[in-house]
C-alpha cells in the first residue's frame, strides 16, 4: 500500500465550529488497484509512509525518541525507545515489520534495528557512517528486502572526487544491501558507481533472489 494526503472535501460531515479549520485526509491505496484501503482524518499535511496495519510516529525529549505504531492515533502502541542525535528514520521491509535507523550519541556510527509492528525486536546492525535517504524494495513474498542508502564519499584523510565525477555524484556514494527480513543477515551488498539521489534505482525479483 501507499499513502497520500488530500484536502477533506466532505464539509457536511464536519461540525459547524470545525468547518473554519483546514482538514485533510490520508488515504492508504492498494498498490495494484489504487483502490482506497483505509482513510484517516488529520489537521495538517504530513509526509507519511506505513503499511496496511498502520503507520509510525515519534515523540521525543532531547535525544530520547519514542516510536509508536498503529492504524490511528488512538490505537498506536509504543514500539521502542531509542537514543539518537539525529531524527531517526523508519522504513518498512514488509507489512508486518519495520526498521528504525538512528545516529550514535558518541561516534559516527549509524544503527538499524528491525522490529515487528507489535514491538518484538528481530535483529540489529551497525553501519560505520550516517546514511541518507533510505529507499526500500521488497520481494513479493517479503522474505528479503533491499535498502539503498547514500553516504559521504570521501572518508577523513582521503582525497575528494575531482572534476566531472564530483559534479555528477554530488560527493556521495550509493550502496544497496539485500537483507533477510526475519534475521537482518546481509545477502548481498552492491556499491553503485553513479548514485541516484532518491536511491530508488533498483528492484527485487518476486522471490528476492535477483536484483535489477
Image: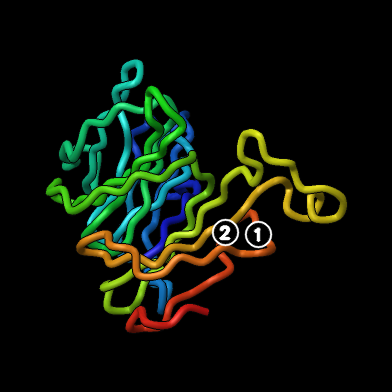
SS for dot 2:
loop
Horizontal side, residue 98 vs residue 155: left or right: left
Of 33 and 54, the residue lying toward us: 54
Tell me whether the residue at label 1 lies in contact with that at label 2, contact meaning CB atoms closer than 8 angstroms.
yes
Residue bearing mark 2: 199
Residue at the image position 28 percent from the left and 67 percent from the top: 180
- Residue 197 quadrant: bottom right
Between disc 1 and disc 2, the foreground one is 1
Distance from disc 1 to disc 2, alpha carbons, whole Å, reads: 7 Å
| Mark 1 nearby-residue class (10 Å; few <14, some 14–19, many ≥20) | many
Q: Is residue 135 above or below residue 202?
A: above
Locate residue 84, reporting x and y percent. Answer: 36, 28
| Mark 2 nearby-residue class (10 Å; few <14, some 14–19, many ≥20) | some
Locate residue 35, reporting x and y percent. Answer: 38, 72
Residue at the image position 21 percent from the left and 52 percent from the top: 123
Horizontal side, residue 95 vs residue 47: left or right: left
Seen from this angle, which residue lies furthest right? 163
Q: Exactly how many numbered labels are in the figure?
A: 2
Residue bearing mark 1: 195
Image quarter hosting the N terminus: bottom left
Amino acid at each position: 500500500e501507499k499513502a497520500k494526503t488530500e484536502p477533506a472535501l466532505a464539509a457536511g460531515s464536519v461540525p459547524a465550529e470545525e468547518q473554519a479549520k483546514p482538514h485533510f485526509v490520508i488515504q492508504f491505496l492498494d498498490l495494484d488497484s489504487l483502490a482506497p484501503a483505509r482513510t484517516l482524518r488529520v489537521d495538517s499535511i504530513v509526509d507519511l509512509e506505513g503499511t496496511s496495519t498502520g503507520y509510525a510516529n515519534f515523540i521525543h525529549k532531547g535525544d530520547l525518541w519514542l516510536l509508536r505504531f498503529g492504524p490511528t492515533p488512538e490505537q498506536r502502541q509504543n514500539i521502542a525507545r531509542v537514543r539518537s542525535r539525529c531524527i531517526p528514520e523508519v522504513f518498512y521491509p514488509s507489512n508486518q515489520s519495520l526498521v528504525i535507523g538512528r545516529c550514535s550519541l558518541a561516534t559516527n556510527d549509524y544503527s538499524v534495528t528491525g522490529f515487528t509492528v507489535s514491538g518484538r525486536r528481530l535483529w540489529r546492525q551497525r553501519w560505520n557512517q550516517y546514511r541518507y535517504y533510505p529507499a526500500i524494495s521488497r520481494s513479493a513474498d517479503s522474505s528479503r528486502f533491499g535498502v539503498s542508502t547514500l553516504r559521504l564519499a570521501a572518508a577523513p584523510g582521503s582525497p575528494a572526487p575531482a572534476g566531472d565525477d564530483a559534479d555528477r555524484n554530488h560527493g556521495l556514494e550509493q550502496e544497496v544491501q539485500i537483507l533477510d527480513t526475519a534475521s537482518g543477515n546481509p545477502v548481498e551488498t552492491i556499491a553503485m558507481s553513479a548514485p541516484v539521489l532518491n536511491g530508488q534505482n533498483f528492484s527485487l525479483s518476486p522471490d528476492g533472489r535477483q536484483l535489477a
